[in-house]
Image: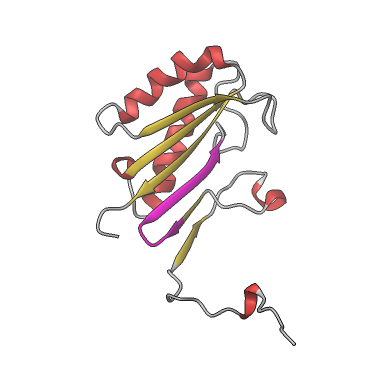
């Protein structure tokens, strides 16, 4: 009789890479169970970064450029905590509740990435958890020499 091997029974082909979770003060972290960033080997991944201030409240209500700037500030801090920097970013994803805001947000992105030039995807979503948020930004980074 044949018995399938379950996923948990399989032995890894390679030893696991160390994982570092970078925590977030977001009021949604405990509910959703997420970290601000995760580093595995030479890769750092940041999920949707919302425009929250240190007090947990939305920064720049009604102003997509101010919200984008706050998102990139949070991203830069999280990358630093993971041992990376903006120069290591290879991809950004900009999620907007109104696609017409793309130019204002792109101008802010250029302040941070004009010389780095990571790939970018811009898309419109119907809304975020907090209706005051106009933008969330995701980032992937690869640290040279891992």
In percent of width and height, residue 23 lies at 54, 54
Q: How is the image coloured?
A: secondary structure
To which quarter of the image does residue 28 belong?
top right
Front in this rendered view, residue 22 or 45: 45
Measured from the top left, where is residue 35 in percent x and y?
Answer: 56, 52
Q: Is residue 11 above or below residue 135?
A: below
Write the residue at 38% across / 62% down: 41
Residue drawn at point x = 61 percent, y = 29 percent: 58
Q: Is-magenta flag for residue 130? A: no
Dominant SS of magenta comes to strand
Viewport quadrant of the N terminus: bottom right
Residue 116 is left or right of residue 123, and the answer is left
The region drawn magenta spans 39-49
In the displayed structure, does residue 115 sit left or right of residue 19?
Answer: left
Between residues 7 and 103, which one lies in front from this camera angle? 7
| Residue 82 can be seen, yes or no | no
| Quadrant occupied by the C terminus | bottom left
Q: Quadrant of residue 136?
A: top right
Give me the residue at 53% from left, 19% from top.
64
Is 49 situated left or right of 118 in this image? Answer: right
């Amino acid at each position: 009789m044949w018995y399938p091997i379950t996923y948990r029974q399989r032995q890894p082909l390679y030893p696991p890479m160390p994982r570092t979770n970078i925590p977030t003060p977001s009021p949604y972290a405990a509910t959703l169970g997420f970290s601000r960033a995760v580093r595995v080997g030479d890769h750092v991944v940041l999920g949707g970064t919302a425009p929250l201030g240190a007090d947990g409240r939305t920064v720049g209500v009604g102003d997509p450029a101010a919200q984008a700037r706050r998102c990139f500030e949070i991203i830069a801090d999280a990358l630093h905590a993971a041992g990376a920097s903006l120069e290591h970013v290879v991809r950004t994803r900009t999620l907007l509740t109104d696609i017409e805001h793309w130019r204002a947000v792109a101008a802010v992105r250029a302040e941070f990435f004009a010389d780095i030039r990571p790939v970018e995807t811009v898309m419109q979503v119907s809304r975020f958890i907090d209706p005051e948020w106009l933008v969330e930004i995701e980032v992937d980074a690869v640290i040279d020499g891992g």
